[in-house]
Amino acid sequence: MTHAVVSVDGFIADEKDDVGPLFDWYFNGDRPIYDDASFRVGAASIDYVKGMWDDIGAIIQGRRLFDQTNGWEARPPAGDNLLVVSHRPKPDGWHPEADVPFFDDLAAAIEEAKRRAGDRTVAVCAGDMGGQAVAAGLVDIVAMDVVPVVFGRRRRYFGPIDAQHLLEDPHVVIQGDRVLHLQYRVRR
């Protein structure tokens, strides 16, 4: 699966790599996703988001997102495992206790993520990594949380993907508060 919150015009960040209002719906509801209550979504979204997050066994992110989030301090918001695809090594001294492997090959990262996830889902973060995974035929489901905002340019959901890829009709369509949850199977 590849997943991200996305603007209606297909962007995951603006021209300054800022997500702006894309994540507001994660914090403006009255239902905590987990006990720490930092993520609070609306009633229409809670079962979908909690179910999807609980099913994620491993997340793969690219180096850009790793640098922006500091690898979520080795504790991704969903899933038990984080793997990073980068041509640069893990930063010296970064969470030496954390089992967060770096790969320079996306297919190898996905194989290891599958091993770690077991029967749970492997989620590839959208953007360059997600686009590369779709282009390589390594993604079965495209999941989007579409927010009613237009960015106009910058970081695209599928990164610099340069070929057409067909998706099936959405098999998940859930109207939330300031978000529309969609999932599509990738047509083979």
Image (cartoon, grey):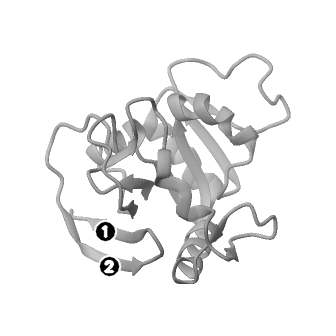
Disc 2 to disc 1: CB gap under 8 Å:
yes
Q: Which residue is mark 1?
A: 184
**Quarter of the image holding residue 2?**
bottom left
Alpha-carbon neighbours of circle 2 within 10 Å: few (<14), some, or many (≥20)?
few
Q: Quadrant of the C terminus?
A: bottom left
Between 6 and 123, the one nearer to me in the picture: 6
Q: Which residue is mark 2?
A: 171
Alpha-carbon neighbours of circle 1 within 10 Å: few (<14), some, or many (≥20)?
some
Q: Quadrant of the N terminus?
A: bottom left
Secondary element at tag 1: strand
**Where is residue 165 drawn, in percent x and y?**
18, 53
| Count of marks overlaid on the render | 2
Residue 36 shown left or right of residue 51 in the figure: right
Residue 186 shown left or right of residue 84 in the figure: left
Q: Residue at x 21, y 70 (%)?
A: 168
**Quarter of the image holding residue 119?**
bottom right
The answer to whether residue 121 is seen in the rendering is no
The answer to whether residue 92 is seen in the rendering is yes
Q: Residue furthest right?
A: 97
Say if 179 sits above or below 6 in the image: below
Q: Residue at x 39, y 71 (%)?
A: 180
Mark 2 is on which residue type? His
**Where is residue 108 drawn, in percent x and y?**
49, 38
Residue 72 shown left or right of residue 124 in the figure: right
First in sequence, mark 2 or 1: give its number. Answer: 2
